[in-house]
Image (tube, rainbow, N blue to C red):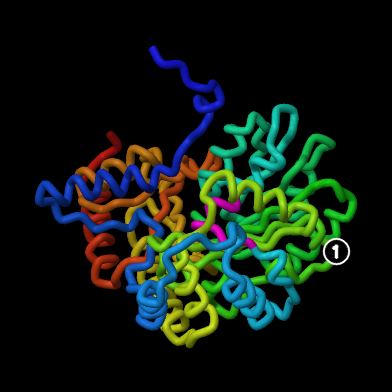
């Protein structure tokens, strides 16, 4: 029998893709499935971005690029950060990567090892914990609580830091909860981190363009006192409906940048050239499509929250960012993962059970409203009928 490296026994995965595969399989069998599971905008990539990639191909952009990304894209990222947050970032600190996960992978590999501790949000994006465990580091969950609006608590986060803490992972606006951490809470955290100068920070801001109700996304790049240990994660997947293009970017402290470059050289070499030119068009071109998409998500958000709160045994606070709701299903009597499975298999609605996002996810399911209003309404009707007719399995 083939023997694999033992640390592969510790690696997890993102169950949203397993649910997508099962939903696709059921659809292939002729079932009508409404997918509120996958975190993927149902909008097409804006035409001017597609045309930029086509032009790049026609212009002969078929070869390798620098591992860190083409300079025009790194400059565009820096200019976009200046426009959105009023921060100055050197293009020499920007890394172009094939999707947001690569930044997580690199940062956690740098700081994770046996004996180290890494703090991460729970419930949170499942790859955080998966990669921490893969490195042999100890994952330390930072509870993300409904009673706090699914924002992280600065006080609780700081209380979990120990002399073994190497990295703190933050995510706002958040997946899977839609929570947005207020500026006052972030500033309390930043002030407290002054007492922990050896702790690096990975700030996952992939949903930074998607906030509602006047909420402001506060980038940690705006705090100069953190810049020498802050890794900023962002990308095109959500903001520009480019999930399949696999285009992300990150900003690294000078002392870590070359390490990230070496990881790129040893793993993916570079992001494909036409996609990088598409990224330039995305960041420097008109932002109207982004605004329209976010406005539509806002309308769907109202629809999904109202509908979820009408379901028997379900309550849902209003998310302030991203395109997810995280309803509390404790009143249904179901555990989260069995309910998510039953909704898919019996009602034809794909959702994700809260425990797929961490130990604090029990009692919740994730519902994506990155689907049409008509499909959301159909899904809510099916969920209501299911919960009214079926007892706990």
Quarter-wise, where is residue 60 in the image? bottom left
Magenta-colored stretch includes residue 267: no
Q: Is residue 356 left or right of residue 221?
A: left
Magenta-colored stretch includes residue 103: yes
Label 1 SS: helix
Quarter-wise, where is residue 136 in the image? top right
Answer yes or no: is residue 90 visible: yes
Out of 380 and 234, give the one closest to the viewer.
Answer: 234
The residue located at (49%, 54%) in the rendering is 176
Out of 185 and 59, give the one closest to the viewer.
Answer: 59
Q: Residue furthest right?
A: 195
From which residue to which does the magenta span run? 95-104
Residue 186: image x %, image y %? 74, 63
Out of 110 and 156, give the one closest to the viewer.
Answer: 110
Count of marks, rendered view: 1
Q: Is residue 19 left or right of residue 357?
A: left
Residue that mark 1 sits on? 225
Answer yes or no: is residue 172 visible: no
The residue located at (28%, 57%) in the rendering is 35
The residue located at (70%, 27%) in the rendering is 114
Q: For the C terminus, which image quadrant?
A: top left
Residue 31: image x %, image y %? 13, 51
């Amino acid at each position: 029998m083939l023997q694999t490296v033992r640390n592969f026994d510790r690696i997890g995965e993102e169950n949203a893709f397993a649910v997508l595969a099962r939903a696709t399989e059921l659809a292939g069998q002729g079932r009508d499935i409404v997918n509120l599971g996958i975190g993927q905008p149902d909008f097409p990539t804006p035409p001017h971005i597609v045309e930029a990639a086509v032009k790049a191909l026609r212009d002969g952009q078929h070869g390798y690029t620098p591992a860190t990304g083409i300079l025009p894209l790194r400059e565009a990222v820096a200019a976009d950060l200046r426009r959105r947050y009023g921060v100055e970032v050197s293009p020499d600190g920007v890394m172009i990567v094939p999707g947001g996960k690569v930044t997580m992978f690199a940062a956690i590999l740098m700081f994770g090892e046996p004996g180290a501790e890494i703090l991460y949000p729970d419930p949170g994006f499942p790859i955080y914990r998966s990669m921490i465990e893969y490195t042999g580091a100890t994952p330390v969950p930072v509870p993300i609580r409904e009673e706090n609006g699914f924002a992280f608590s600065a006080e609780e986060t700081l209380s979990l830091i120990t002399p073994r803490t190497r990295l703190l992972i933050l995510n706002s606006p958040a997946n899977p909860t839609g929570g947005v951490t207020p500026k006052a809470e972030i500033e309390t955290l930043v002030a407290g981190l002054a007492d922990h100068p050896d702790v690096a920070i990975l700030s996952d801001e992939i949903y930074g363009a998607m906030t509602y109700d006047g909420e402001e996304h506060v980038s940690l790049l705006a705090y100069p006192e953190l810049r020498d240990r802050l890794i900023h994660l962002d990308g095109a997947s959500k903001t520009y409906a480019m999930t399949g293009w696999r285009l992300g970017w990150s900003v690294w402290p000078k002392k870590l940048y070359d390490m990230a470059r070496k990881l790129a050289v040893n793993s993916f070499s570079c992001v494909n050239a036409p996609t990088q030119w598409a990224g330039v068009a995305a960041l420097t071109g008109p932002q109207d499509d982004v605004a329209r998409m976010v406005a539509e998500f806002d309308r769907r958000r109202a629809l999904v929250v109202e509908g979820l709160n009408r379901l028997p045994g379900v309550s849902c606070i209003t998310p302030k960012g991203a395109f997810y709701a995280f309803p509390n299903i404790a009143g249904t009597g179901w555990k989260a993962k069995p309910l998510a499975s039953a909704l898919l298999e019996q009602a034809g609605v794909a959702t994700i059970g809260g425990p797929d996002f961490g130990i604090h996810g029990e009692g919740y399911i994730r519902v994506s409203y990155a689907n049409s209003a008509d499909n959301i309404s159909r899904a809510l009707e099916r969920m209501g009928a299911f919960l009214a007719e079926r007892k706990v399995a």
